[in-house]
Amino acid sequence: MGTPVLSETQLKKTLSAKKKLKKTTVKNVLAAPYSNYWPLLKTEDTTSLLDLLNEHLTKIKPTKVNIPWSELKNIPRLDRKEFRLNYIKTKLDSQEMFNKPNNSEIVFGVNETTRLLENDSVSSILITGEVNPQIMVKHIIDMAVLKKVPVLIIPNLKNTLKEKTGIASVTIAFKELSMDSQYWTIDQKIKEISSNYAVPQDHINYHRKDYNSDDDELISQCSPMDVDESSFKSESKPSCNLYLFRKSIAERAFVPELSQKREIIQPFNELEVNSSGFLAFSDSITNRKSEDDTRKDNIQKKSKVSYKSLLIKRITNNKDRGKKKIDMLKRSK
């Protein structure tokens, strides 16, 4: 009589199989109701843009020279320093000539790109498609939408930048360029392609306006010490003077006008007494309440403000978390 063999369904019910099963946890998380904008390029646009990058980008940083131990071990210890210098010099001479990066035209890295966006001095942005996690560059895309700056996600950008410029960067940003610049054609191509990748209307910055640039222009045109009191009374044209100063300690710099005229309420000692013995108030209070209600209704009708409710997403645990830790430990060794 042969040994009994368990079937697959019976194996799943055994204790050893139950221990191998990992418990899946599900969490309900509140998420933003706005959609993400990830303008990943198609294959046709990717090839055309990568060709331009390979054509116009030049070497900025030399590649690192590693001396093989098979050549270094035969050199005496005291002469190794001189051998290293000569070896690196000969290798760099054989490599392609590199130029210093022109910070007035291009910028590499997430932090530098963010600073350019904050200063409103960027023309176009490229981001690699292999960035992980994507939240690392999400603020750049959101700011670019707000500032109306073309931004594109291009696959294999990091490897291309490392091969052509020597800098393995996640992002590259182009400043306002002239027609004589070597990067001008790349910038124009990015603007041309970005018109085909429209921003979704439910993006968080789609309907917003960038008021910082407008305020800077207004401040540059105005002088801070000139105060025109008549400009605050006029309602037709906004004033160019942004600052007010107190003339004395006892006065306020700005006294806001009353939005509604206050009604003088009659004192209690002057009020008439009803036959029931209660004070007879006039109908001014009830009339005032009704006027306030109508005014609030009119304001709500004029201001078209709509709020989106938060979404609930169900998130499960990462099953490959243990495998990633093992891979990281192997790489570190």
Image (cartoon, rainbow, N blue to C red):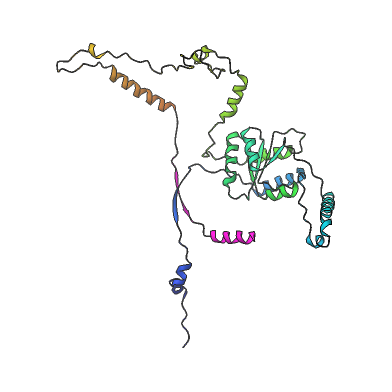
Residue 301 horizontal side relative to residue 279, left or right: right
Q: Is residue 319 above or below residue 292?
A: below
Q: Is residue 36 visible?
A: yes
Residue 259: quarter of image: top left
Q: Is residue 103 above or below residue 264?
A: below
Q: Is residue 132 above or below residue 242?
A: below
- The x and y percentages for residue 310 are 44, 42
Residue at image coords 45%, 68%: 18
- 144 or 104, which lies in front? 104
What range of the chain is rendered magenta? 308-333
Q: Is residue 149 visible?
A: no
- The x and y percentages for residue 182 are 76, 38
Residue at image coords 24%, 16%: 281
Residue at image coords 58%, 29%: 212
Residue 49: quarter of image: top right
- The x and y percentages for residue 278 are 18, 18
Residue 301 horizontal side relative to residue 56, left or right: left
Question: Does the magenta portion include 33?
Answer: no
* Residue placed furthest toward the bottom: 1
* Residue placed furthest toward the left: 275
Q: Quadrant of the C terminus?
A: bottom right
Question: Does the magenta portion include 313?
Answer: yes
Total numbered labels placed on residues in the image = 0
Residue 262 horizontal side relative to residue 68, left or right: left
- The x and y percentages for residue 166 are 74, 48
Residue 26 horizontal side relative to residue 74, left or right: left
